[in-house]
């Protein structure tokens, strides 16, 4: 019986993260910041499979997002984003890995790389039932996407002009990452 209990405990410690992980984003248009959202469907998450607590799990996170997997449920919008913001070779993937974990204040700092530029981005996280939910904001221009963003804003000007004739496309996007955890008995 003792051996069986040990095997069960080992199984729990090796299966902390269940895939797939869902990555949602929200961009904004108009001065009123009207939300336009979407998801990425090709997301790869790796972590230390021997992690036995939340801190060791978070410290070992690595994420790769294929930007071509963008889905906004609007074919025209998908095409506009993919042919401007993510049109260059260096923007085919977004890669992130954990740099710092702060369990007391529920955040992690991830080194995020887009277009060969790496920035440290703070992600707040919450533990809800069987999921970890991470959220942050990212300024695309800070990642060297200034020209691509200008091209995107110009291409979408007709869609991003309000009733007063004012065109506004915001370069900052909000990101939410949701991952299921198969063993919620992990401790801080």
Image (spheres, grey):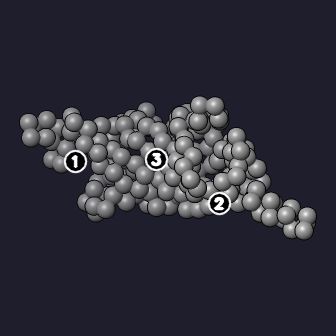
Residue 8: name its quadrant: bottom right
Tag on residue 176? Answer: 3
Query: Is disc 2 placed on a helix, strand or loop?
Result: loop
Residue 149: name its quadrant: top left
Q: Position of residue 144 (x, y in %)?
A: 43, 36
Which residue is painted at 70% across and 52% down in the image? 185
* One can see residue 44 in this view: no
Relative to residue 115, is residue 182 depicted above or below? below
> Which residue is nearer to you in this view: 164 or 14?
14
Query: Is disc 1 placed on a helix, strand or loop?
Result: loop
Which residue is painted at 40% across and 48% down in the image? 25
**Which quadrant holds the N terminus?**
bottom right
Neighbours of disc 2 within 10 Å: few (<14), some (14-19), many (20+): some
Neighbours of disc 3 within 10 Å: few (<14), some (14-19), many (20+): some
Tag on residue 156? Answer: 1
Instruction: Tell which circle, 2 or 1, labels the residue nearer the N-terminal end.
Output: 1
What residue sits right under mark 2 in the picture?
182
Relative to residue 90, is residue 12 depicted above or below? below
Instruction: Tell which circle, 1 or 3, labels the residue nearer the N-terminal end.
Output: 1
How far apart are labels 2 and 3 at the CA level?
A: 20 Å
Instruction: Specify whether 105 is left or right of 149.
Output: right
**Is the Cβ of the residue at disc 2 closer than 8 Å to that at disc 1?**
no
Query: Is disc 3 placed on a helix, strand or loop?
Result: strand
* One can see residue 49 in this view: yes
Q: Position of residue 147 (x, y in %)?
A: 34, 39
Instruction: Specify whether 157 is left or right of 125.
Output: left
Which residue is painted at 28% across and 61% down in the image? 74
**Is the Cβ of the residue at disc 2 closer than 8 Å to that at disc 3?**
no
Q: Nearer the viewer, mark 2 or mark 1?
A: 2
Q: Position of residue 83 (x, y in %)?
A: 33, 54
């Amino acid at each position: 019986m003792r051996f069986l209990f040990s095997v069960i405990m080992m199984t729990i410690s090796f299966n902390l993260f269940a895939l797939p992980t869902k990555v949602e984003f929200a961009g904004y248009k108009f001065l009123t910041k009207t939300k336009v959202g979407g998801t990425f469907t090709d997301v790869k998450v790796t972590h230390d499979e021997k992690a036995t607590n939340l801190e060791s799990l978070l410290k070992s996170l690595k994420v790769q997002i294929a930007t071509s997997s963008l889905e906004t449920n609007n074919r025209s919008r998908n095409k506009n984003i993919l042919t401007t913001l993510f049109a260059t070779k260096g923007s085919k993937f977004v890669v992130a890995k954990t740099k710092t974990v702060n369990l007391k204040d529920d955040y992690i700092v991830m080194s995020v790389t887009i277009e060969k530029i790496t920035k440290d981005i703070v992600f707040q996280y919450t533990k809800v039932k069987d999921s970890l939910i991470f959220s942050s904001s990212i300024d695309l221009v800070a990642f060297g996407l200034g020209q691509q963003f200008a091209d995107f804003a110009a291409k979408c000007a007709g869609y991003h002009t309000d009733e007063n004739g004012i065109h506004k496309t915001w370069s900052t996007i909000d990101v939410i990452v949701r991952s299921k955890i198969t063993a919620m008995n992990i401790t801080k």
